[in-house]
Image (cartoon, helix red, strand yellow):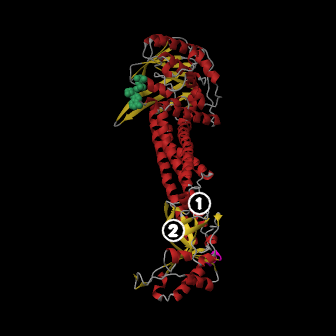
């Protein structure tokens, strides 16, 4: 039973106030069939919306089945709409991309009743549309759509049906069908309130109310009220428990919505896809670079010092030729003799040379070293042998060559024992160096190694060394050895105290190593944060699309609320949608990253791997982005007032 007393409703539009309803008093009994008539603008719809709990009165009291409902919260009203009321609209308000049976089942999504497909089919039968269950609304006539809408209004077995000009958009044949169904429902005990401007329809009602300018003008009983048990609404809480099935259904529907809008969904996924792919690839790239550098440095040894001659400065001016300090082989011998913590000292000379074998020429680097080279640089020949100390002393014309030189000069031929010309001097090949692989721009296999004495006196014609590799007994002795070397050399060369800081350069491999790995770490952090920014941009893309989607589907939101969706339900629906976008985008991004990483690893020769943690990070990050950037649009959607949303064009 409906009991309305002193209800007013006014709308403020800018400065002016429109009074849609002025002091309405009305009682409607259970089982009645009431028609409301009146000219356009007289307040019929406004009254219906208040009675149907889609809108609240500005003033006055409304009791539904004995319970005051005019001041209930929006969510409480949603629960009442769902359980007690069916609403039929002039424009049908079916969801366009859903078959008839799903449109009918929609209110079940928001109720605690079991989602039962059978019930939808029973209702389809009741409105004589059993053959149209799989048809979408655009494949149905107006009359058929309205019958689907009636079936939808009945799915939660309401006790009252409100219909606002249900036949206003229909031809006269459909009008008769619809009215027959509605009258049949009323005869089964459902209270029926119908707004119409057609006298014939008004004439079929048991009670006819006429309105004008927001007041009831006349109220006429035309047929007796049937005897029927009075309904009562308990005062129990209207809270609805959340059920998991609803969540799954939201994701399901979110997925379907995206499917029906393929291009747009793909575009909004693209941002997340690129973002995730970039983050994962950058992390893998950074780690790969770091590993490559570490590997290269490890092959140099961590307790290695490299000594190079510097230059004497006098009064801050670098003194050029003549006063340059040159390290001799004697210096190396003295260092080894005086500093006990030096395990090995390997003198080096080097220069660009041209190597010739038969008619083949190859420009490469010749490296003059001592036999200690094999240990310090872990370069024991894979084929043949290294030269001996006596060969070094005798300045023998022997060479050990790298694989690149082998390929360029000999192809598949065995080079051992062959003679090549290095800068027109004959050398015999006695060994081949182990292959180190191209690491970065420097090809460590493109070199010819010869005895240092041969290099100095026979090939390059100089009596000084370019550098000395010094292996220290243990890494913690690096600093003291470094200081001792400076002291010994400065004394031997009588370097003035003022110039001693610049007289030699000593590179500490351990320092170099940590500096390099530090900078590669910084680099990969930088790259990943740039990639993360693209993920953020992807998120903003999703938000943008979601906001468009909310605006586009305002009427849909209104309809969902009208059939019982609470704020939370609408929120979940849109969040589910944005999470589906971002997660699918994220997964595709991971696949892309995997492809890119594998092919990059192949071309660069880096040990690049996608690690589980970077996968997890980017996956959760994309879910997170879906939630963060979905919340605002979802909130915006859930805050819409049902009747405003339904009126939206
Ligand atoms: P009916 O359904 O009888 O044609 P309505 O109930 O729709 O009339 O409208 C009653 C009056 O209230 C009209 O003057 C209309 O302009 C006004 N009105 C209805 N809805 C709104 C609204 N959302 N904002 C402002 N005025 C409104
Ligand atoms: Mg109206």
**Please, what is the dominant secondary structure of the magenta stretch?**
helix
Q: Which residue is mark 2?
A: 422
Indicate which disc, 1 or 2, sits on the residue closer to the N terminus.
1
At a point 49% along the width and 26% down the height, the residue shown is 96
Q: Is residue 541 above or below residue 166?
A: below
Q: Position of residue 73 (x, y in %)?
A: 54, 37
At a point 62% along the width and 33% down the height, the residue shown is 235
**Magenta span covers which residues?**
473-477
Q: Position of residue 207 (x, y in %)?
A: 50, 15
Q: Which residue is mark 1?
A: 291
Q: Position of residue 287 (x, y in %)?
A: 57, 57
Q: Within the image, what quadrant is residue 23 found in?
A: top left
Quadrant where the image shows the N terminus: top right
Whether label 1 touches label 2, CB < 8 Å: no
Quadrant position of ligand 2: top left
One can see residue 636 in this view: no
């Amino acid at each position: 039973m409906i009991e309305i007393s002193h209800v007013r409703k006014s709308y403020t539009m800018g400065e002016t106030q429109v009074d849609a309803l002025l002091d309405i008093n009305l009682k409607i009994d259970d089982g009645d069939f009431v028609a409301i008539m009146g000219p356009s603008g007289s307040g019929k719809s406004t009254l219906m919306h208040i009675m149907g709990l889609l809108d609240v009165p500005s003033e006055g009291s409304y009791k539904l089945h004995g319970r005051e409902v005019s001041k209930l919260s929006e969510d409480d009203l949603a629960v009442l709409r769902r359980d007690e009321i069916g609403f039929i609209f002039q424009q049908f308000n079916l969801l366009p991309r859903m078959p008839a049976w799903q449109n009918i089942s929609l209110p079940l999504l928001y109720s605690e009743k079991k989602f039962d497909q059978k019930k939808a089919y029973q209702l389809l039968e009741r409105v004589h549309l059993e053959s149209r269950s799989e048809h979408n609304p655009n494949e149905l006539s107006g009359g058929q759509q309205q019958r689907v809408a009636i079936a939808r209004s009945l799915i939660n077995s309401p006790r009252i049906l409100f219909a606002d000009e249900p036949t206003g958009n229909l031809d006269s044949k459909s009008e008769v069908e619809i009215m027959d169904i509605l009258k049949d429902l009323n005869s089964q005990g459902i209270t029926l309130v119908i707004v119409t401007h057609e006298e014939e329809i008004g004439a079929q009602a048991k009670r006819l109310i006429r309105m004008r300018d927001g007041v009831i003008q006349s109220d006429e009983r035309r047929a007796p009220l049937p005897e029927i048990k009075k309904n009562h609404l308990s005062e129990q809480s209207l809270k609805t428990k959340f059920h998991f099935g609803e969540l799954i259904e939201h994701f399901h529907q979110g997925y379907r919505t995206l499917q029906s809008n393929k291009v747009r969904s793909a575009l909004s996924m693209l941002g997340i896809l690129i973002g995730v792919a970039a983050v994962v690839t950058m992390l893998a790239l950074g780690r790969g670079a770091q590993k490559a550098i570490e590997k290269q440095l490890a092959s140099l040894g961590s307790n290695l010092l490299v000594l190079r001659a510097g230059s004497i400065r006098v009064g801050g001016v670098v003194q050029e030729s003549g006063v340059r300090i040159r390290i001799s082989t004697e210096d190396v011998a003295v260092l080894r003799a005086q500093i006990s913590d030096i395990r090995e000292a390997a003198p080096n000379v080097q220069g660009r040379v041209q190597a010739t074998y038969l008619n083949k020429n190859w420009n490469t680097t010749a490296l003059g070293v001592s036999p200690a080279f094999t240990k310090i640089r872990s370069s024991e020949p894979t084929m043949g042998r290294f030269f001996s100390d006596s060969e070094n002393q005798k300045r023998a014309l022997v060479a050990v060559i790298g694989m690149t030189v082998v390929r360029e000069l000999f192809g598949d031929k065995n080079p051992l024992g062959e003679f090549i010309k290095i800068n027109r001097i004959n050398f015999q090949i006695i060994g081949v160096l182990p292959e180190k692989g191209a690491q970065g721009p420097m090809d460590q296999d493109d070199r010819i190694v010869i005895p240092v004495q041969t290099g100095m006196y026979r090939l390059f014609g100089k009596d000084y060394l370019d550098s000395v590799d010094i292996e220290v007994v243990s890494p913690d002795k690096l600093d003291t050895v470094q200081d001792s070397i400076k002291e010994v050399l400065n004394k031997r060369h009588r370097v003035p105290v003022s110039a001693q800081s610049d007289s030699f350069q000593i590179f500490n491999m351990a320092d170099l190593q940590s500096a390099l790995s530090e900078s590669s770490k910084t680099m990969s952090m930088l790259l990943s944060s740039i990639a993360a920014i693209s993920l953020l941009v992807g998120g903003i893309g999703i938000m943008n699309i979601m906001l468009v989607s909310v605006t586009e589907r305002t009427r849909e939101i209104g309809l969902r609320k009208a059939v019982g969706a609470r704020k939370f339900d609408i929120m979940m629906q849109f969040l589910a949608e944005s999470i589906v976008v971002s997660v699918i985008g994220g997964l595709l991004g991971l696949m892309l990253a995997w492809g890119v990483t594998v092919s990059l690893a192949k071309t660069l020769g880096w040990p690049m791997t996608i690690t589980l943690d970077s996968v997890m990070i980017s996956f959760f990050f994309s879910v997170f982005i879906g939630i963060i950037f979905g919340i605002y649009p979802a909130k915006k959607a859930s805050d819409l007032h049902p009747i405003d949303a339904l009126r939206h064009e």
